[in-house]
Amino acid sequence: MDATIRADLDAIPAYAAGRTVPGSLKLASNEISLPPPPAVLAAIAAAAAAGNRYPDPAVTGLTARLADRHGLSTDRIAVGCGSVLLCQQLVQIVCGSPDDEVIYAWRSFEAYPIVVRVSNARNVTVPLDAEYRHDLKAMAAAITPHTRLVFLCTPNNPTGMALRRDELCAFLDEVPANVLVVLDEAYHEFVTDPDVPDGLTLLDGRPNVVVLRTFSKAYRLAGLRVGYAVGDPSVIGALRKVYPAFSVNSLAQAAASAALDCLPELLGTCAEVTEERTRVRDELLALGFEVPASQANFVWLPLGERSTEFAAHCERERVILRPFAGDGVRVTVAGADENDAFLAAARKFAL
Ligand SMILES: *Cc1c(COP(=O)(O)O)cnc(C)c1O
């Protein structure tokens, strides 16, 4: 007889990660294509030498560095094994019954439906508007007495649109105080629009708001798995309770601390990426593609029924993209040469 597995797990979609194809360029996972800086690699090697020891379960050093950087007390920051796991922990601290609802826009980050289902809560999705932006009015209207959490992904993965200060503040003021609002700012370092706020500036007086940041994108540590949540001590304290023991390993802790010493280099690359984003978008527009003005390190091509075909075409040209069948294709903006390779492939596609 087989073990009794939760039947609802059958309905959970598998997370479809960007594919790596040997010999092809990967523009499918929004990574920075440069390796971590030498000082970070040295810190990882030094930490590896003590790999026989368990990591610091409280992530003391890195938490203190982040607190110092943001001018906050350490009880307002929880470091986790990537912000995806923090998303799951956030759902876990507010959802306990199958009637509990989590609202987010769709299309948005593919991890949300999974972490909600894993936590036995209910997914409530609100379609993006015609400009691929969050429809905040519809999201506010979707809140019910069962709503426990709202994810706002800004800039939104995969459409690249970011929420502006006015609309975001109006929404936060409308949400009932007992509903947790999570601002997933994984692409914060690529934002150039001055009307897009830094979520950390919105936390004062809003204890139900949490900001998520990650070391996976701008900080070039996607393989090491470090993210952090910033919020009210009550929320952060609860997050630490559902934290799987030792989930931030010692190499990751050392690497993230070392990366904080390399900010000029890391953020300099982000600035280059945002310039490339403008160039790539302008060239795609000239080719006749529709390209929403992204605030992240990727662009969204809403190709609808031709999405899979376009990604397959680019794959034959040895450029791997991230198609969402029937909807669009997400293309990571990388270094100039890599972007040129993608643009050359796009030029050969008959729109
Ligand atoms: C890439 C990404 C993350 C990062 O997740 P990690 O687990 O920290 O690697 C988080 N949120 C969104 C929307 C992302 O696109």
Image: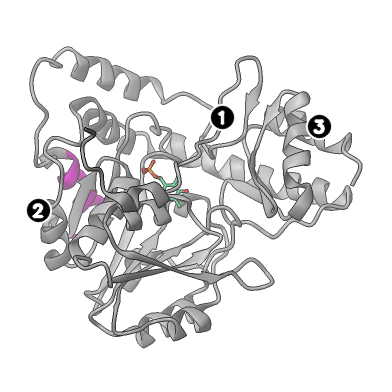
Q: Position of residue 305 (x, y in %)?
A: 77, 52
Badge 2 or badge 3: first in the primary sequence: 2
Residue for badge 3: 345
Q: CA distance from mark 1 to mark 2?
A: 34 Å
Residue for badge 2: 241
Whether the residues at callouts 2 and 3 have beta carbons within 8 Å, the answer is no
Q: Give the dominant element type of the magenta stretch: helix, strand or loop.
A: helix
Residue nearest the observer in this picture, 113 or 98: 98
Query: Can residue 303 be spotted in the picture?
Result: no
Whether the residues at callouts 1 and 2 have beta carbons within 8 Å, the answer is no
Q: Tag 1: residue type?
A: Arg
Q: Quadrant of the N terminus?
A: top left
Within the magenta stretch, is there residue 67?
A: yes
Identify the image quadrant of residue 348.
top right
Label drawn at residue 19: 1
Q: Residues within 10 Å of mark 1 (few under 14, many from 20)?
A: few
Q: Nearer the viewer, mark 3 or mark 1?
A: 1
Q: Tag 2: residue type?
A: Lys
Q: CA distance from mark 2 to mark 3?
A: 49 Å
Residue that protrudes farthest toward the top in the picture: 49
Residue nearest the observer in this picture, 254 or 272: 254
Name the residue: 44% across, 81% down.
142
Q: CA distance from mark 3 to mark 1?
A: 18 Å
Query: Can residue 133 be spotted in the picture?
Result: yes
Tell me the magenta residue range.
62-72
Q: Residues within 10 Å of mark 3 (few under 14, many from 20)?
A: some
